[in-house]
Image: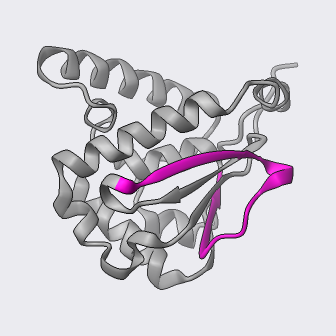
Amino acid sequence: MLFKPERGLFPPALQKALGILPVPPLGFALTRAVRRLAHTRPELFERLDSYKRSHFIIDPVDIPHVFRLIPNGEHASVEIFKRKDMPEGDARISGPLIILLGLVDGTYDGDAVFFTRDLVIEGDTDAVLALRNTMEEADLSPAEFVGFNGRSRDVVDRATNKTLDHLRRLLDAPTATS
């Protein structure tokens, strides 16, 4: 029998496998990417206003890790924690990883996935709204987020988008909303 994932969730075997991976290198890479973005597009972080020092807990419910994002411009940080060590935050955004990634790359509209209950928001909803508005304004491509430009940017974007589209179909994730 073929495994049929719950709507957009990674299969349990993959969830367990991700639990054994070391987390610090990814946190370091994500922090560098966010800081690079703050350097190249500071207006995005200015939009956050008083919420730029907020602690956002990004909770992909189908992997054993959570992320704490503090989007404080060039002093931004992204830390990764084992789920059992989840820190407190001003706001928590929970949903399947593929949906959270789709919020970053613009595949999904935050309001739509919130109202279909594919996304759960807890805590300071004003802070989450400020972050959502900033992400929508950013209109980031995957390559731009990690710092690619020129010809390599197009190659990275095509490969990433194709891979994520395939993964969304494989995981029976919601249809794109934007």
Give the residue drawn at x 32%, y 38%. Answer: 145
Question: From the viewer's perspective, is residue 63 above or below residue 160?
Answer: below
When asked about the image quadrant of residue 111, the answer is bottom left
Left or right relative to 61: residue 168: left
In the displayed orientation, state which residue is furthest to the front. Answer: 75
| Quadrant of the snapshot with the C terminus | bottom left
Please tell me which residue lies in front, 30 or 110: 30
Residue 166 on image: x %, y %: 50, 24
Is residue 72 located in the magenta-colored stretch of the structure?
no
Is residue 89 located in the magenta-colored stretch of the structure?
yes
Give the residue drawn at x 46%, y 22%. Answer: 163
Give the residue drawn at x 28%, y 63%. Answer: 45
Please tell me which residue lies in front, 153 or 52: 52
Give the residue drawn at x 27%, y 30%. Answer: 147
Left or right relative to 134: residue 113: right
The colour mode here is one colour
Residue 34 on image: x %, y %: 37, 46
Question: From the viewer's perspective, is residue 90 above or below residue 116?
Answer: below
Q: Is residue 94 visible?
A: yes
Q: Is residue 178 visible?
A: no
Chain part drawn in magenta: 75-95
| Quadrant of the snapshot with the N terminus | top right
